[in-house]
Each structure stands twice: as structure tokens, then as C-alpha cells.
Image (cartoon, rainbow, N blue to C red):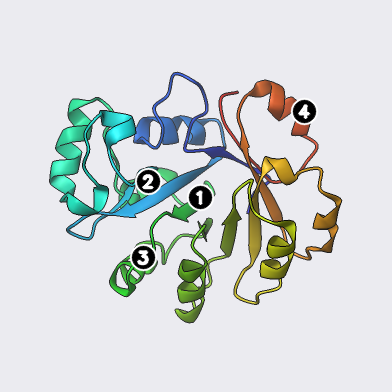
Amino acid sequence: MPTHLIHRGLAKKNFKENTLTSFRYCFEKKYGVETDLHCTKDNKIVCFHDFNLNRRFKINKKIKDLNYLDLKKISRKKRAEIPLLSELLKASRNKFPLLLELKPIFSSKNLKKLLHETKKCKNCALISFQEKNIYNLSKSKTKLPKGLLFSSTAKIKTIISKSKKSYIDFMILHKDFLQNKSLSMINKPVYYYPILNKKEFIKYNQTKNLVFENL
């Protein structure tokens, strides 16, 4: 995996998160991206952050309760069309790294679909806050790297303990842990998120493995 990736494809403030337009701009600038994955009612894998549409589109409907064509219609009307994972993979052309976050716990059917869509991806890694997703992926014998996410409220003892699990290849921690000396006990790569602006990026740029936005 690379040193730095752009969070939700937000290279600049004027971009809309997790859209093909924002992703393609990142690729033009030679950056990989981090994005979030959900499954629709008809089992399509889409790039979208939230579990529902309320924050982005002021519509109180959940991704999992909508068929993809309905979701596409809603988001296109709001000029922020939600892309399929397959569209992102096509846009990346296997040249740019992708950090793919599984937001809900994926069913076995949707995990198989995810692995089928990413089977030719040479620069993908799969991550989740849900350890069950990572464990289930390890049982699939996928060769894609797998990372476990932690929020700012996680306990350092828990993080260190989880890092020892054989099915976890790397860790993704909130930037609040950047100065924590106990991380020296982790013998795996560690990524940090979210570096929110250019000032923070300059501050932490000597640190490897940043997930950043709004430069």
C-alpha cells in the first residue's frame, strides 16, 4: 500500500465525497483514494459513507433498503451520483491504490460479490471497523491486505491486542494516536486518519501512511 491516500476522494473542498468526479481528480494527481462501501437492497456494492441518505440528500432512507436504480436516481437528481464499486475499479485502471472500507457487516453473499469484483485488483486493501468483516475475509483466503479501523475513543490496550491477530495485516487509527508512544509495540503497518486540511498535512507529513483531504 502507498504512503498517503485521499479520504473519500476529497482532494479539495469543492468536491463532493465518494463520487467518480472526485475519484478521477485524485487519480489525475497520482493519489490513491479511501472510500466506503455499502450494499443496496438488490446487492449492488456502492461507494457511500453513511448508512442512510439524510446527511447528504435530506432523505431519511437507508442504503440497504433501496435498489440501486432508485439510489442512482436520487443521487443524480442531487448532482452527486453514487457510484458502483465496479465503476471506481474501472476508473482506477489498476494503477492507483484503493483503501475500501466495509461499513456494515457484509453477508456471505455480499462478501463473495466483493471478492469477485476485486479479484483482479492489484492495489486494493479491505478495511473495516467491524472485526467480523476482517475475520470473515480471512476465511475466504483472499490475498488482499486486510486492515482494522479504530476510532479516537478506542483503548490503546485494545489496539495493541487486536494488532496481534494473525488475520489483521495492518491497522488504521484515528490521528489522536499519532503521538502515542505505546504504538511502538505494534509490529504491523499503521495508517492514520483523517488529516483534514493542508495545515494538518504539513504538520504530519513526515509521518508515513496518512489518509487526508482538502489540500
| Residue type of the residue flagged with mark 1 | Leu
Horizontal and vertical percent position of residue 144: 53, 67
**Residue under pointer 3:** 106
Q: Indicate whether 196 appears above or below 94.
A: above
Crowd tier of the residue under label 3, counting other residues whose Cα lies within 10 Å: few below 14, some 14–19, many 20 or above: some
How far is mark 3 from mark 1, CA to CA?
A: 19 Å
**Residue under pointer 1:** 98
| Residue type of the residue flagged with mark 2 | Leu
Q: If you read the primary sequence from the N terminus, does the residue marked by circle 3 or circle 2 appear first?
A: 2
Mark 2 and mark 1 residues within 8 Å of each other at the beta carbon: yes
Quarter of the view holding residue 59: top left
In the displayed structure, does residue 206 sit left or right of residue 93? right
Counting every numbered tag in the picture gives 4
**Numbered badge on residue 88:** 2
Mark 3 and mark 2 residues within 8 Å of each other at the beta carbon: no
Q: If you read the primary sequence from the N terminus, does the residue marked by circle 2 or circle 1 appear first?
A: 2
How far is mark 2 from mark 4, CA to CA?
A: 30 Å
Q: If you read the primary sequence from the N terminus, does the residue marked by circle 4 or circle 1 appear first?
A: 1
Horizontal and vertical percent position of residue 101: 47, 53
